Amino acid sequence: MLEPTPLDERKQQILKAVVSDYTVTGIPVGSQVLAAKYFIALSSATIRNELADLVGTGYLQQPHTSAGRIPTDRGYRYFVDFLMEPEAATPGVRRTVRQEFETAPRSVDGILEKAAMVLAQVTENVSLVTAPEISEQRIKHIDLVSLEPQSVLIILVLEGNLIKQQVVHLDRATSQDDLSRMAAMLNRKVKGQTAEELAARLAELGPDRDEQRRIIERVVESITTHQAQRQTVVLHDGVRNLLRHPEFVEVSRLEELLELLEQGAQLASILQQVAFEKDVEIVIGRENTSSGLRECSLVLTTYKMADRVRGTIGVIGPTRMHYGQVVARVRLVSQATSEVLAHFGN
Amino acid sequence: MLEPTPLDERKQQILKAVVSDYTVTGIPVGSQVLAAKYFIALSSATIRNELADLVGTGYLQQPHTSAGRIPTDRGYRYFVDFLMEPEAATPGVRRTVRQEFETAPRSVDGILEKAAMVLAQVTENVSLVTAPEISEQRIKHIDLVSLEPQSVLIILVLEGNLIKQQVVHLDRATSQDDLSRMAAMLNRKVKGQTAEELAARLAELGPDRDEQRRIIERVVESITTHQAQRQTVVLHDGVRNLLRHPEFVEVSRLEELLELLEQGAQLASILQQVAFEKDVEIVIGRENTSSGLRECSLVLTTYKMADRVRGTIGVIGPTRMHYGQVVARVRLVSQATSEVLAHFGN
DNA sequence: GATTAGCACTCCCCCATGGAGACTGCCAAT
DNA sequence: ATTGGCAGTCTCCATGGGGGAGTGCTAATC
């Protein structure tokens, strides 16, 4: 990392102009273009001197000797931290988002899928949405269904109408009637607790040979192990959007990214590393630990359910993206998602 | 469509050699290569004459004047119908498939996801798997969970531990206790029936104002509407595999295909049009009604659950694919899937 | 009549060449 | 500090020719 170089006002304006122009056109920006479009009061020669300085301090780079300048990762970073002007989502986009969510199904899974779809559509990038952590969710309802004499299907309804299922085997045969009685009892006891709370209470009680107790243990276990598996689930949508970006005409880059997306596990760990110091976090190019994302940026925020942060939502796209617009739209979709999810709160 | 031209033995062998060589190398096949690798007894001039005939009858084509020959869709069709030799999956592939299914979750959804994953992996193409039709599935268990006084979550457990949920609104407030009683009653009555049977029985009874009856109607409705939505669900995996095929270096083709895959609905209707006259159906290039699949082939078969066909499984890839191998592997994965699903039968 | 050798021809692919254009860096003048 | 001017550098693109692969045709051969 280079030491932070303070930029004077004019250099900032030039950096800003380069990023703005480049993110729109995709063409390296030359001194003449800058003079004509953004700095009529200055000559191109003056701008050339400034550009040379900005290259020297690592904010800009030249693809080759006689080309214009493009931002470095550092340049993008400075831009999003200090220069980017807040943009508001256009009414058209707002309408699209609103309409899409009106037709969303009434379950957390369905809403998150919809969110991924809408976000991909309005940002023209790949969207990412992490599923909420299950073990923190309150249990609404438990049901036990007999499959075979010694085999039981546990159904958990969590807040948000999230349904989790798990098959467990019992030590001895148990009838559906017995299971139904147990389920009724469990429902009175566990309602409104989280799996974590339940696990803690179980630990207090110590070992017990009661069959009912066994089942509760299995229930808790099923939630926590399910969690471990499900943690890695990251919804995504809009891969087709990437193909429109010229940076992906090279199929090799696309391949790395696709592998990352189809694997899921690695992606989940990347998203978990992001610390949300601001409401919208931006990770640019090589700031990513993963090599497949060297030339990509992430724009991420969180969504809430019942006033608690439950997951991450955002997009992944080429470093050369219209950050202001993408930030506005990610924020918009996140808010809309949180609103729709609010009902599923308690 | 050209009139069927009978091919003599030697023309068949040459066509077979062209398809075999081209599917492996991806390079148009010339008369010299054929003479050297497949027909040592013949001169290249003789083969040239035969090749010219095969072009005339529409089985082969030339990309340009001085290039070798490549198969037309018609050539591929003749190959898969009459010339293709049955191939067996290699032990290595069998082992992979077996191992993957051993770690599959115990639910239909999970198994089908796993099947899609494995199939994509072993065929190095994009896999497609349709979810089973819900309305034909027997109902194992019904549960009613009160969300708000007038809002109920209906949970259906179908055979195969398939869980379907739907939120419905009631005309008047109903307590969880009442709902539980209704659920118990419903369970006794509907158990083992399919949604279709239930709908038929409901129709016989005629209108009724009973609240319980209302709920049953909603349940049936939820299954059938769910069906209409879910019908369109086609799992897929392995898009990254496509990038390795040279026919997709042109991103535009990839884009059409991706759009098809991400939409789902259109894909589902394509799969439904396929009539399974043989155990494995192959659809080649322009035989596809969809324009996005003009240069793709489908290799499809069905999978079973409790000895009944429940869905389609197969791959989509470039017309230039190793059909013999792909057919063998699709068949293998289909069988493995059916075996794992067999338990969920009754 | 089928097969084959020989040959002229066609067309793609690759690469080298060179001019146009874009932009820079530097220098001297303001 | 800013600017005009200018030589220099590099990409991009169009052009053109050589090499190579493969063909179709014809005449000779089995």
Image (cartoon, coloured by chain):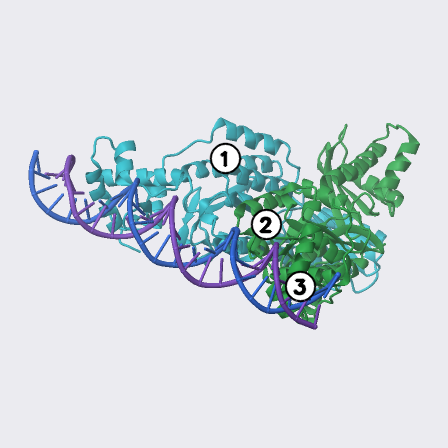
Chain colours: A cyan, B green, C blue, D purple
**Quarter of image, res B264:** top right
- At label 1, which amino acid type do we have? Leu
- At label 3, which amino acid type do we have? Thr
- At label 2, which amino acid type do we have? Glu
> Which one is closest to the eye, mark 2 or mark 1?
1
Label 2–label 1 contact, CB within 8 A:
no
> Which one is closest to the eye, mark 3 or mark 1?
3
Q: Which mark is residue A321?
A: none
Quarter containing the C terminus of chain B = bottom right
Q: Chain of mark 1?
A: A
Q: Which mark is residue A136?
A: 2
| Secondary structure of the residue carrying numbered label 3 | helix
Q: Which mark is residue A332?
A: 1
Q: Which residue is mark 3?
A: B46
Where does the image place residue A187, in percent across and percent down from the top left? Answer: 73, 47
Q: Residue at x 63, y 55 (%)?
A: B70
Q: Chain of mark 2?
A: A
